[in-house]
Amino acid sequence: MGNRLQKYRGCLLAVALGDVIGSKYEWMSSRDLNSQFKTPLDVIHGTSLKEDAYYTDDTQMTICVAESLLKDGRINRENLAQNFSESYDTWRGYGAGTRAVLNAIYTGATVEDASVAEFSEGSYGNGAAMRVAPLGLYFPKNQELLRSAVHDASSITHCHRHGIEGAQIMANAISYMVRVKQFEIDEYWKVITNAVESNNFRLKIDQAMSLSSLDDLIEYGSDISALDSVPTALACAAIHHNCLLTAIGTAILIGGDTDTVASMTGALVGALVGDHAIPETFIKAVDRDNKKGATYLITLADELEKASNKQ
Ligand code: AR6
Ligand code: MG
């Protein structure tokens, strides 16, 4: 188990680790992945980062949330929306709904109008949940502040109630992981169920609690919606809470939205165990291929750790 600073670093670096490695296998089937790799660790060690360690929207938007929090001391929706828009690289694999929102913000729409640019009831995708880690790290002990910050950070692009609910659940689970010294499975699921609001999530989370193997996870499945991916990541993190690389590799072997489920799983387990398992080769490759690389993520994690003491 890492110390406090290692836990903050572990969380943000694992967002990127799951994203970078997972993005190489996005939409592959579990059958193809499991015939290519014998074990979850094979996925991590068998993926070359020599030519390409670019991260996708998961890490980019997580960076934006951390930057905005640190700059404003809270979530200012307009400033965060501007940050999302200014850092939007079209090639980083954003979802169609989020692309439409960011284009609308770029052309001067208000945040309210932009949030329904693609879907009249807002997006129920996992794009708000995948970027929520800095909020769980920033407000580990203040549920009310966490709740309103998650709402404000999520509703810019995901004002559908399931999009926001998935982010609330993830943020509470991250804050549990970073708070505790010892993982207690019953306490973990209790924190999660306390954040659940809808029957749809209640049902999915009830099922997720009983999963115990990769086969279970594959049968349970993962998809692009918050409802069909956040509980998968929560279960994968619970099963492999003591090994970050196995957790991320397992999340990828489930198939489907591999980068985002692996990134969310990584955020959870990284916040628990810390950064000791993050390979040095990965840090170097992400620094090489991204202007704001792994060293920058470490700086953000350190600043979040310092600032969170005041919350
Ligand atoms: N009505 C119909 N379809 C919807 C709705 C809705 N209200 N909401 C979402 N969808 P999106 P994200 C479907 O585009 O959540 C990236 O790779 C629709 O097909 O908001 O930001 C990320 O890394 C829509 O395109 O994206 C994530 O892995 C899709 O759900 C993933 O994509 C995703 O919603 C989702 O990112
Ligand atoms: Mg993605």
Image (cartoon, grey):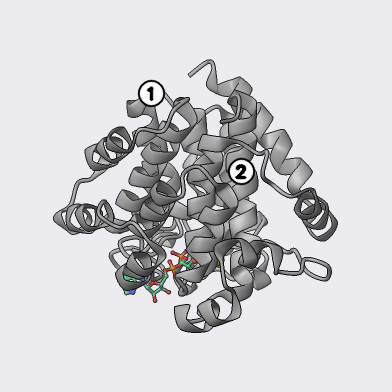
State the residue position of label 2.
12
Work out how far the residue at label 1 is from the one at label 2, CA to CA, in angstroms: 20 Å
Left of 116 or right of it: where is 62?
right
State the residue position of label 1.
142
Q: Residue at x 57, y 41 (%)?
A: 11
Q: Which residue of the protein is positioned furthest toward the left in this rendering?
A: 199
**Residue 269 coordinates in the image, percent (x, y):** 51, 44
Q: Which residue of the protein is positioned furthest toward the front in this rendering?
A: 38
**Residue 199 coordinates in the image, percent (x, y):** 14, 55
Query: Which secondary structure, mark 2?
Result: helix
Question: Closest to the observer: 112 or 53?
Answer: 53
Q: Which amino acid does label 1 sit on?
A: Asn
Question: Closest to the observer: 101 or 235?
Answer: 235
Question: Closest to the observer: 95 or 294?
Answer: 294
Q: Is residue 79 visible to the viewer in this orientation of the structure? A: no
Q: Which quadrant holds residue 47?
A: bottom right
Left of 204 or right of it: where is 119?
right
Q: Which of marks 1 and 2 is in front?
A: 2
Q: Which residue of the protein is positioned furthest toward the top in this rendering?
A: 310
Q: Which residue is drawn at 32% across and 38% down?
A: 185
Q: Residue at x 64, y 73 (%)?
A: 24
Instruction: Determine crowd level at label 1: few under 14, some 14-19, many 20+ residues with C-alpha closer than 10 A.
Output: few
Q: Contact (CB < 8 A) between labels 1 and 2?
A: no
Q: Which amino acid does label 2 sit on?
A: Leu
**Residue 120 coordinates in the image, percent (x, y):** 30, 68
Q: Which of marks 1 and 2 is nearer the N terminus?
A: 2
Query: Which secondary structure, mark 1?
Result: loop
Q: Residue at x 53, y 46 (%)?
A: 267
Res. 234 mark: none
Q: Is residue 145 above or below residue 247?
A: above
